[in-house]
Amino acid sequence: MVAHHSHHRLDSPNQVTVRDASYGIASVAYQKGEYSKASHFFGIAAQLGHALSQFNMGLMHQNGWGVPQNSKHRGHWYRLAADQGDRDAQVNLGVLY
């Protein structure tokens, strides 16, 4: 899924590199079941506006994977991803309310 970042401005090409590298590291860690590491790197990418990482942070908070279960954080991350058009986040957010 490719998310459009029309309302998120990245300050520099370095932020794009950090965002994309963090997502890649997180994805590999997640596939290996290293949820604490995955949540750390998804968090970095999510804070830099990466919609799929924002969705994944919501999912991790929903399930307690690598982070404590937290409905407030779950909703926050799903909302950010949903606002960027992430359909899975929109569905999950809709289920919350």
Image (spheres, helix red, strand yellow):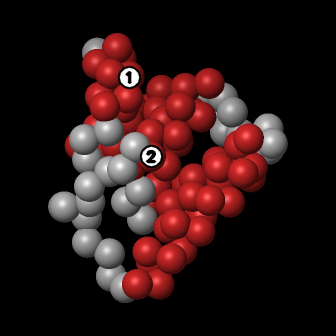
Q: Residue, x 53% and y 31% (percent of image)?
A: 59
Dot 1 or dot 2, earlier in sequence? 2
User: Residue 84 location, x and y as percent?
Assistant: 26, 47
What amino acid type is highlighted by mark number 1? Asn
In this rendering, is residue 22 above or below 93?
A: below
Q: Can residue 70 be seen in this view?
A: no
User: Residue 69 location, x and y as percent?
Assistant: 61, 28
Circle 2 residue: 52
User: Residue 24 location, x and y as percent?
Assistant: 62, 59
User: Residue 76 location, x and y as percent?
Assistant: 38, 39
CA distance separating discs 1 and 2: 13 Å
In this rendering, is residue 75 above or below 24?
A: above
- Where does the C terminus fall, quadrant-wise? top left
Q: Quadrant of residue 63?
A: top right
Q: Is 10 positioned to the left or the right of 13 in the image?
A: left
Circle 1 residue: 92
In this rendering, is residue 20 above or below 76?
A: below
Q: Residue, x 59% and y 34% (percent of image)?
A: 60
What amino acid type is highlighted by mark number 2? Leu
